[in-house]
Image (spheres, rainbow, N blue to C red):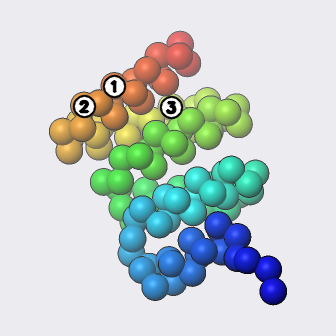
Amino acid sequence: MSEPTRRQKLEALLTDEPNDPFLKYALAMECAAQGDVPAAVDWFERILREHPEYIPAYHQYGKMLLQLGHQEQAQAILQRGIREALRSGDTHAAEEMEALLTGLA
């Protein structure tokens, strides 16, 4: 029997902790790393819907969308992320997302 993949391990952990935003984020990132863009998008969208305070998801989702050439969608996600980061006092994350937006101009 083969060893479970990282993705399978994350999915199993998420079954035990279905409300853990970090596990959802890790799964989104793993799907993106594997090139499973539809699954990554689904996970990022789920995180932002269920855990809008989870700032890293905005940044990474925005970066992924930029890499895919979805400029307008990336801009909207990054702007939402900046607002959420500032609301929570995370100026560093807001500045990083601002830098991504500046690169779009």
The local crowd at label 1, few if under 14, some if 14 to 19, many if 20 or more residues have their Cα within 10 Å, is some
Q: Amino acid at mark 2?
A: Thr
Q: Amino acid at mark 3?
A: Gln
The local crowd at label 2, few if under 14, some if 14 to 19, many if 20 or more residues have their Cα within 10 Å, is few
Separation of marks 2 and 1 at Cα, in angstroms: 6 Å
Q: Nearer the viewer, residue 26 or 75?
A: 26
Which residue appears at 74% of the width and 54% of the height?
34
The answer to whether residue 42 is visible is yes
Q: Amino acid at mark 1?
A: Glu
User: Mark 2: which secondary structure?
Assistant: helix
Which residue position holds label 3?
A: 75
Report the quarter where the N terminus lies.
bottom right
Sequence-wise, the earlier of marks 1 and 3 is: 3
Q: Position of residue 54 (x, y in %)?
A: 35, 53
User: Mark 1: which secondary structure?
Assistant: helix
Which residue position holds label 1?
A: 95
Which residue appears at 49% of the width and 24% of the height?
100
Checking the image for residue 91, the label placed there is 2
Query: Which image quarter: residue 66?
Result: top right
